[in-house]
């Protein structure tokens, strides 16, 4: 505790002299050229998975600086709120942004920031009185591992057209998969679920038609198909992932993964022996391309401008079949996750195996509708205010009607057939000062059953888990207050939040700590967070944050501190150093109950009632990066300006593990040490050819080679613009686990060779 207070005091002093908080907290300045660069940030743990999803969606959808609101512009990486508002003011003054390079010329953005957001920017539609402008786009992806060069792939096509003041856009995505179950149904013979084993399937997970209508004082947006939505401080409704959402957005995001999937996901079931051979149990294969299920239906958004007042109304409805991980579902009678048997079409009653660790497709249907009404005022003296109300309602219908199913307590969905939320939001500001708030209540609460995950019994026939039937009937609520002070150089953000223990809103995604309570982050938490960034000197930037929060149900106080500094030593050379400290229990209140042994990642300790005791450990993490961008005359003349970028990095962390190896008779609560290091490079030859690559080493336990993962990885990519309207991309990756765990030594393949390609064409 004393060490935590010392570190807190030191970083509080740094915060006084520190710098602008950005919309999303990044550990380094985000600068990418394409999607692969974004995946690299995720691989190197420089961004969290949620931030990656947000940036991937922004990269796929794009932001039109001539039409986007300042809230949408603020979602772009590295921009402050002042930057976003300056862009909006500039385009009003100039009646549009004719050339985005003018933003640098006229002092709206720095050159570094403009270059960083370029991949996320789409060009404004060109209008011709009485004419039509059309553009078609097609994209083909393929992915394979080792001796199978092409196992899964994506075909994406889109068409845009502009007719007078009407923008039309449509998209269709087809995906080939090999690892998904299908045809989940109820088996009356077994009183259980039954499904067809994985096989080659084709899906259309993303497709939409979008229409935009623009007039001087009226804007209408309509989407039919796959889309997302979000409003205000994201407390009542948001599945867009954006930091400051404001309306509905089409959804076409598909993502890939570079973690192999197991070949055989079956256990013995009714058979005498396991259906998986010894080799199949340790064999892995190419994963499918993945997608998240947003909303499927239609939405309309209308904005009317009356002098200094903007009125906006949004309505949306969604109806779709949804998939769910099999252990997030329970049979309400047995209080167990239902068994899922392997369908044998030739003899449905013959003994068969059962599936484990699987996602069950189309297991339930969700009908959802909602809306938002808001009014915004902003005058010429930069005084601004807004008020809004958001509400939604969701109804759940389980497809196998003959078995009573519901969500388990650790699922993100609350139990019961209906849930929803309603909230009100306010905003007021004068010049650089802004204050935002949102208060929300949910219309359905989850049962308060403190259960443990039953996946430890996945390979057995019993996945039972005792639960109680106690229900809390008080009205749950949540509130968030966000204050922002922003200038052209600095931005500070202070957030105070309270999320009731019974506040179960799966569509609420406000600022929250990474821990979860019964499947949700924005639940059972109260806290305060301060973020600040400032350019102290022209060549020095420091970014920092402090987050203090409490887990209400367990009365545990947590602390997270982060600081990042970047210095440009010379024009081609920059150095950055970051540090993070996290304490999961400042009071150490659970140490006696857990035999005085701390953990950080996962707890194995139980209290007298059999409930899991949360981890109370600490983690320290530091990262060093050196970036070299030579602009040597002969290289520039040969390859173009700044054609080579080299980045070297080293990350080291100390954390409480809780394992007996780090808690011996002579030492207790010894820190586990992990580290990773690597080198990334990028070289552009003229304007149409780019090479990039990565060399990476990661060790999740330095002390023991047979305890956790050790991995080496190398990647090489070539991107070639065949013409103005066509580009091809090839990618090769090699990875190998080099630790001596039994699971690694038996793993096949041990050497992973990944090959992928992308072809893009614009017609």
Image (spheres, grey):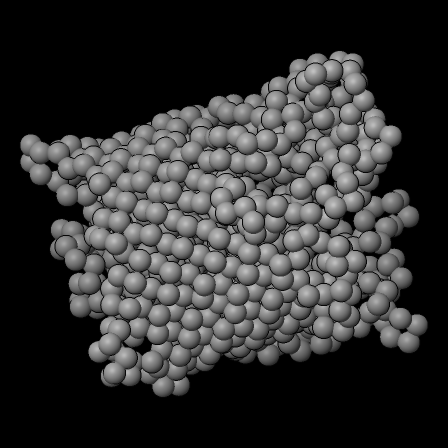
Q: Residue at x 24, y 76 (%)?
A: 638
Left or right position of 241 against 76: right
Left or right position of 68 against 706: left
The quadrant in which the N terminus is found is: bottom right
From this viewpoint, is residue 186 visible?
no
In the image, residue 192 lies at what x, y percent?
A: 76, 21
Quarter of the image where one finds residue 37: bottom left
- With respect to residue 457, does 560 lie above or below? below
In the image, residue 420 lies at what x, y percent?
A: 55, 30
- With respect to residue 683, does 589 lie above or below? above
Toward the right, the furthest residue is: 665
From this viewpoint, is residue 207 visible?
yes
In the image, residue 553 lies at what x, y percent?
A: 74, 48
- With respect to residue 1, does 514 lie above or below? above
Q: 636 or 590: nearer the eye?
A: 636
Left or right position of 700 against 311: right
Q: Residue at x 45, y 45 (%)?
A: 142
- With respect to residue 471, does 188 lie above or below? above
Q: 8 or 169: nearer the eye?
A: 169
Quarter of the image where one finds residue 483: bottom left
Q: Residue at x 78, y 55 (%)?
A: 603
Toward the front, the furthest residue is: 147
In the image, residue 84 lies at what x, y percent?
A: 31, 57
């Amino acid at each position: 505790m004393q060490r935590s207070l010392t570190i807190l005091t030191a970083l509080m002093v740094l915060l006084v002299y520190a710098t602008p908080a950005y919309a999303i907290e990044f550990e380094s300045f985000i600068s990418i050229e394409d999607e692969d660069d974004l995946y690299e940030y995720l691989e190197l743990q420089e961004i969290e998975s949620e931030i990656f999803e947000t940036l991937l969606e922004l990269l796929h959808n794009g932001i039109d600086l001539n039409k986007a609101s300042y809230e949408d512009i603020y979602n772009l990486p590295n921009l402050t709120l002042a930057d976003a508002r300056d862009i909006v003011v500039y385009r009003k003054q100039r009646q549009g942004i004719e050339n985005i390079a003018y933003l640098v010329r006229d002092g709206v953005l720095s050159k570094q920031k403009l270059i960083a957001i370029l991949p996320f920017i789409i060009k404004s539609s060109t209008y011709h009185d009485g004419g039509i402008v059309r553009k078609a786009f097609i994209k083909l992806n393929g992915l394979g591992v080792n001796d199978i060069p092409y196992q899964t792939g994506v075909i994406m096509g889109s068409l845009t057209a502009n007719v007078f003041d009407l923008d039309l856009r449509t998209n269709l995505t087809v995906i080939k998969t090999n690892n998904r179950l299908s045809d989940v149904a109820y088996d009356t013979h077994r009183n259980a679920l039954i499904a067809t084993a994985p096989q080659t399937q084709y899906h259309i997970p993303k497709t939409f038609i979008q229409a935009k209508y623009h007039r001087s004082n009226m804007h209408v947006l309509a989407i039919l198909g796959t889309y997302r939505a979000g409003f205000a401080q994201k407390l009542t409704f948001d599945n867009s992932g954006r930091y400051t959402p404001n309306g509905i957005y089409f959804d076409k995001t598909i993502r890939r993964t570079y973690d192999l999937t197991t070949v055989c996901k079956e256990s013995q079931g009714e058979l005498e022996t396991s259906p998986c051979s010894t080799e199949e149990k340790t064999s892995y294969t190419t994963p499918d391309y993945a997608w998240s299920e947003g909303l499927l239906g239609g939405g309309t958004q209308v904005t009317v401008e009356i002098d200094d007042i903007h009125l906006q109304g949004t309505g949306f409805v969604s109806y779709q079949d949804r998939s769910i991980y099999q252990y997030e579902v329970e049979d309400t009678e047995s209080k167990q996750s239902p068994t899922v048997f392997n369908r044998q079409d030739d003899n449905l009653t013959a003994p068969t195996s059962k599936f484990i660790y699987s996602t069950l497709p189309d297991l339930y249907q969700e009908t959802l509708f909602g809306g938002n009404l808001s009014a915004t005022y902003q005058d010429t003296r930069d005084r601004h205010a807004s008020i809004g109300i958001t509400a939604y309602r969701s109804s759940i219908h389980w497809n196998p009607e003959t078995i009573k199913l519901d969500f388990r307590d650790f699922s993100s969905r609350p139990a019961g057939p209906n849930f929803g939320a309603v909230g009100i939001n306010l905003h007021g500001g004068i010049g650089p000062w802004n204050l935002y708030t949102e208060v929300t209540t949910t219309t359905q609460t989850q049962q308060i059953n403190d259960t443990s995950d039953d996946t430890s019994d996945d390979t057995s026939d019993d996945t039972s888990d005792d639960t109680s039937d106690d229900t809390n009937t008080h009205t749950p609520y949540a509130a968030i207050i966000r204050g922002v002070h922003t200038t052209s150089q600095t931005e500070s953000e202070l957030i105070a939040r309270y999320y009731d223990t019974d506040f179960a809103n799966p569509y609420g995604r406000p600022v929250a700590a990474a821990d979860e309570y019964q499947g949700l982050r924005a639940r059972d938490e109260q806290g305060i967070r301060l973020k600040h960034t400032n350019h102290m000197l022209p060549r020095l930037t420091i970014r920092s944050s402090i987050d203090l929060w409490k887990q209400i149900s367990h009365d545990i106080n947590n602390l997270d501190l982060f600081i990042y500094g970047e210095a440009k030593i010379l024009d081609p050379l920059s150095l950055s150093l970051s540090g993070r400290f996290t304490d999961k229990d400042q009071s150490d209140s659970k140490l006696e109950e857990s035999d005085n042994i701390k953990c950080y990642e996962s707890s194995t300790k139980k209290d007298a009632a059999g409930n899991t005791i949360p981890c109370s450990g600490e983690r320290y993490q530091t990262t060093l990066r050196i970036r070299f961008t030579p602009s040597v005359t002969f290289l520039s003349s040969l390859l173009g300006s700044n054609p080579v970028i080299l980045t070297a990095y080293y990350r080291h962390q100390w954390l409480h593990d809780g394992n007996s190896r780090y808690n011996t008779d002579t030492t207790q609560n010894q820190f586990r040490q992990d580290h990773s290091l690597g080198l990334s490079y990028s070289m552009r030859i003229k304007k149409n050819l780019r090479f990039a690559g990565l060399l990476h080493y990661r060790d999740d336990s330095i002390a023991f080679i047979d305890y956790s993962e050790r991995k080496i990885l190398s990647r090489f990519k070539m991107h070639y613009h065949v013409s103005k309207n066509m580009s091809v991309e090839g990618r090769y990756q090699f990875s190998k686990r080099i630790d001596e765990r039994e699971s690694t030594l038996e793993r096949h393949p041990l050497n992973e060779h990944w090959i992928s390609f992308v072809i893009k064409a614009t017609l």
